[in-house]
Image (cartoon, rainbow, N blue to C red):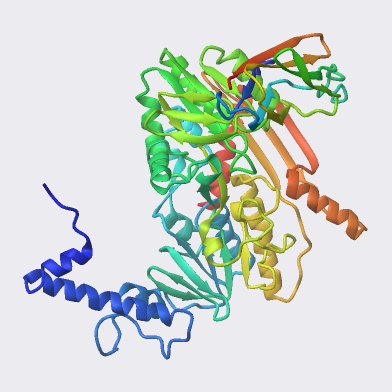
């Protein structure tokens, strides 16, 4: 019942003053199999992990993470963001099977 | 309208009245208590007993604890006091007596009835009756030739080798502490003492057997529908598979009684922590419509009024719940000043090859208050207790017993109709011959962090009725070891 792709982005709140610095937390449920673990008797578990995480603030891409097989299960990232204008904040996770997961939250100044 | 009357107000207002006499009596009493407290760690000039020949007013309770000798027959040999009558303590008391028959063993336990935490999930689902998991301490003591003393330990003086209980003190030659666990609600963001009380009494964790289990049983039996939340804590918690087994058992009750309810299992860990294949299969194949599993949920608060568990990312509203917070070593260990300051769960500071308190070969800590990464389970506690009993018996004769790691056997019931279980058994990594100190250090560090260095491992992840029967047999064998 592990729901791959269940994801969340959490902001401290939604309304801010201009130039506030806030901490954004992100997390996605993903097994992140690195391809080197074995089943008890059925050979290796196929590689399946998040390999790209991008964050867009409005139209501008502000973060791009080249993730690799070393990433943990259910990866959790936080970062600091300086709020400059009202715009949606969009986090995109892509995995090695070509799946794309997106989560958007609104930031208002 | 009634005013709030403080005790001070009460004393002032009732001056001269009949109540004044009682109040004066109370003051006199508390005066004596503080006197007793001052001399607490000092040496009382003589051992006076409450009913003895002492002159003056009777001792108040605090002084009573210090000055009265517990009403126990005089020891006929070296006396060992075992504190805590759980799986570790009961096995310890029996095996101390078996290893050194000349020893006089006293088991001090605060409860008067033994209720087993292992197998209690089966009872919650109605698969065994309460008699199966309830046992008598008196039987244990009579059958195994030691003394059961129904009291609560309050303090110990290691210099005088004396342990203080609410029914007087006991002098010991060897002291074994097996006090188990306490809950750490701060770790799930419940800091306020009244909030902690509210969560503890309304949504008890039911991992310390007794009223908590009875409350949870009633909750499950009377559940009418909706979401029933269970949580899996962080850290090395008591019985790793138990929350998953419990989720299966509660879901099986909903399934059997056709209740429109779901178990909401909120797990701090990124995935099922132990026996993953077995539990995953059960979740998918047996309880698809009765169970929701959410991994990586760190709980940051509980709102009792709104029936909501706050996760770091999402909030989960429930209709009823049993909230299992993070656990820590028993508070008794902390009160005695024996906490290992490097232990994130406030466990005891012991020599992990012999289980004695560092620098004191008369005091031992076993069971769930130990700091090593061994699983906090009944089976492990029994195996450990047998080894430590040999250590103590050996040291009485001036011999050192070679270190031995415990093994553990662990069944989990996943289906109730028919009764099907899964199994995992393993032995923790033993010391290698000729191992270098550096390698040894790595092994120890590995345990402390993961608790997962195995010498051998045996797994049966496909649930079967055969394992279900083996599980009940396991319980009988283990109960037999204690009673």
Residue located at (86% from left, 55% from top) = B440
Along the line of sight, which residue is nearer the eye, A6 or A11?
A11
Name the quadrant containing residue A68. Answer: top right
Q: Nearer the viewer, residue B437 or A90?
A: A90
**Place of residue B21 in the rendered image (x, y in percent of width and height, measured from the top left):** 12, 75
Q: Between residues A40 and B320, which one lies in front from this camera angle? A: B320
Vertical relation: B74 (above or below) B81: below
Residue B176 shows up from this direction: yes
| Whether residue A49 is visible | no
In the depicted structure, whether residue B48 falls above or below residue B128: below
Say whether residue B218 is left or right of residue B291. left
Q: Name the residue located 71 percent from the left edge and 70 percent from the top edge.
A: B394
Q: Residue at x 60, y 26 (%)?
A: A11
| Residue B336 horizontal side relative to residue A99, left or right | left
Q: Is residue B98 above or below residue A26?
A: below
Q: Residue B24 falls in which quadrant of the image?
A: bottom left
Residue at the farthest front position: A18
Residue B337, x across and y down, in percent: 58, 67
Position in image of residue B436 (x %, y %): 92, 58
Q: Is residue B413 left or right of residue B445?
A: left
Placement of B150 over or under B482, stated as above or below: below
Expressed as whole percent of the image width and height from the top left, the position of residue B196 reads 43, 44
Image position of B333 (left or right of B451): left
At 54% across and 40% down in the image, what residue appears? B188
């Amino acid at each position: 019942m592990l729901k791959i792709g269940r994801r969340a982005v959490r902001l401290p709140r939604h309304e801010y003053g201009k130039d506030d610095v806030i901490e954004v937390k992100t997390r996605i449920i993903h097994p992140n199999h690195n391809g080197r673990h074995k089943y008890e008797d059925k050979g290796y578990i196929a590689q399946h992990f998040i390999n790209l995480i991008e964050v867009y603030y409005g139209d501008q891409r502000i973060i791009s993470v080249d993730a690799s097989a070393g990433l943990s299960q259910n990866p959790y990232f936080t970062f600091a963001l300086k709020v400059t204008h009202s715009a949606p904040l969009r986090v995109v996770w892509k995995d090695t099977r070509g799946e794309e997961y997106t989560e958007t939250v609104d930031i208002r100044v | 309208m009634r005013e709030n009357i403080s005790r001070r107000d009460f004393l002032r207002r009732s001056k001269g009245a009949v109540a004044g006499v009682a109040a004066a009596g109370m003051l006199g009493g508390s005066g004596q208590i503080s006197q007793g407290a001052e001399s607490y760690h000092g040496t009382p000039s003589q051992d006076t007993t409450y009913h003895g020949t002492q002159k003056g007013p009777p001792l108040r309770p605090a002084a009573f604890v210090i000055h009265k000798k517990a009403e126990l027959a005089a020891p006929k040999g070296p006396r060992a006091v075992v504190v805590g009558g759980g799986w570790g303590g009961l096995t310890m008391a029996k095996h101390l007596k078996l290893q050194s028959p000349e020893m006089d063993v006293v088991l001090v336990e605060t409860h008067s009835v033994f209720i087993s935490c292992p197998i209690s999930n089966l009872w919650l689902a109605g698969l065994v009756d309460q008699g199966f998991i309830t046992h008598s301490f008196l039987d244990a003591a009579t059958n195994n030739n030691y003394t059961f003393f129904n009291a609560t330990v309050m303090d110990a003086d290691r210099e005088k080798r004396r342990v203080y209980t609410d029914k007087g003190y006991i002098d010991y030659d060897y002291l074994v502490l097996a006090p188990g666990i306490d809950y750490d609600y701060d770790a799930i963001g419940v800091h306020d003492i009244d909030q902690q009380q509210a969560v503890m009494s309304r949504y008890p964790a039911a991992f310390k057997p007794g009223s908590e289990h009875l409350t949870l049983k009633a909750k499950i039996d009377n559940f009418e529908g909706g979401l029933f939340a269970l949580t899996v804590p962080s850290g090395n918690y008591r019985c790793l598979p138990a929350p998953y087994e419990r989720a299966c058992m509660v879901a099986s009750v909903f399934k059997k009684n056709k209740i429109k309810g779901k178990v909401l299992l909120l797990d701090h860990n990124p995935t099922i922590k132990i026996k993953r294949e077995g539990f995953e299969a059960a979740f998918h194949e047996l309880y698809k419509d009765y169970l929701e599993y959410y991994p990586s949920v760190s709980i940051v608060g509980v709102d009792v009024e709104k029936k909501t568990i706050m996760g770091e990312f999402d909030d989960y509203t429930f209709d009823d719940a049993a909230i299992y917070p993070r656990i820590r070593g028993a508070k008794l260990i902390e009160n005695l000043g024996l906490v290992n300051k490097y232990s994130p769960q406030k466990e005891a500071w012991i020599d992990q090859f012999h289980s004695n308190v560092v620098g004191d070969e008369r005091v031992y800590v076993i069971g769930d208050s130990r700091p090593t990464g061994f699983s906090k389970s009944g089976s492990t506690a029994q195996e450990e207790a047998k080894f430590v009993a040999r250590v103590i018996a050996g040291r009485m004769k001036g011999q050192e017993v070679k270190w031995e790691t415990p093994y553990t056997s662990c069944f989990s019931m996943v289906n109730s109709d028919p009764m099907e279980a899964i199994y995992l058994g393993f032995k923790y990594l033993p010391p290698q011959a000729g191992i270098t100190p550096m390698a040894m250090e790595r092994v120890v560090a590995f345990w402390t962090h993961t608790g997962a260095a195995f010498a051998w491992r045996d797994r049966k992840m496909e649930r079967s009725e055969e394992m279900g029967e083996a599980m009940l047999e396991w319980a009988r064998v283990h109960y037999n070891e204690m009673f």
